[in-house]
Amino acid sequence: MLNLYYAPGACSISPHVVLREAGLSLSLEKVDFKLGKKLADGTAFTTINPKGYVPALRLADGRVITEVVAIVQYIADLQPESRLAPPCGTFERARLHEWLNFIATELHKGLGSLFGPLATQALKDATRQKLTGRLAFVETSMSGQPWLLGNSFSVADSYLLYFLRTWQRSAHGTLTPALADYYARLLARPAVQAALTAEGLP
């Protein structure tokens, strides 16, 4: 059994979706950030992940993996037949690394500048402009294909799901028609619907 520590609406939705796509048995452990990063039993989440943020994945032997990029690839490699990630050592796997790192550093990280308490309006405006440009790159790269890596849904798509959802719902950003269609394809996947429902997300 794999235990996923998550917070509703956080980037932990990405490994949550991947676990369901892979058909693996999972247990969800909600982290309550409003109560000081506590688990349901009152345990401090920092005893699981000293970094203090989600996601974290606890394995059956008690070891813990953190960071979205590491977790989703680990899950994909547990179930290679799910084809959620190309085989290690291939060009396609390098392309997956490229997308995952792009999403983490050029999209996900940028969200912090929009919500930080010390962020000036000038910084927020510049960040929105930058993120809009990055999304334009995503759209151009996906031209003529349904998913980031081509015809197959991958763990990179699960990570981009988080960004696109947050970009629209929290940052009040908009999507072009092509990206809106892509987002609709993501939401139509049963694993995505199941993960959102399990986390109580609309």
Image (tube, rainbow, N blue to C red):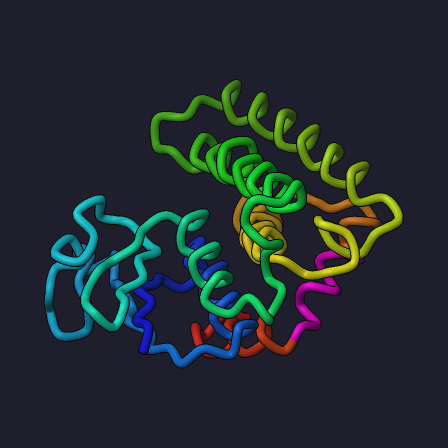
Give the farthest residue toward the top. Answer: 122
Q: Left of 185 or right of it: where is 178? A: right
**Which secondary structure dominates the residues rendered in magenta?**
helix
Residue 142 drawn at (x, y percent): 79, 44
The quarter of the image holding the C terminus is bottom right
Give the farthest residue toward the front. Answer: 89
**Residue located at (72% from left, 39% from top):** 138
**Residue located at (32% from left, 54% from top):** 54
Residue 25 drawn at (x, y percent): 40, 81
The part of the image, by quadrant, that contains residue 136 is top right
**Residue located at (59% from left, 56% from top):** 85
**Residue located at (72% from left, 60% from top):** 152
Residue 43 drawn at (x, y percent): 10, 66
Determine whether 83 is above or below 97 in the image.
below
Give the farthest residue toward the right. Answer: 144
Residue 148 versus residue 190: which sits nearer the camera? Answer: 148
The part of the image, by quadrant, that contains residue 174 is top right
Residue 60 drawn at (x, y percent): 25, 73
Range of magenta residues: 181-189
Q: Is residue 162 magenta?
A: no
- Residue 172 in view here: no
Q: Left of 201 or right of it: where is 45? A: left
Residue 31 versus residue 5: which sits nearer the camera? Answer: 5
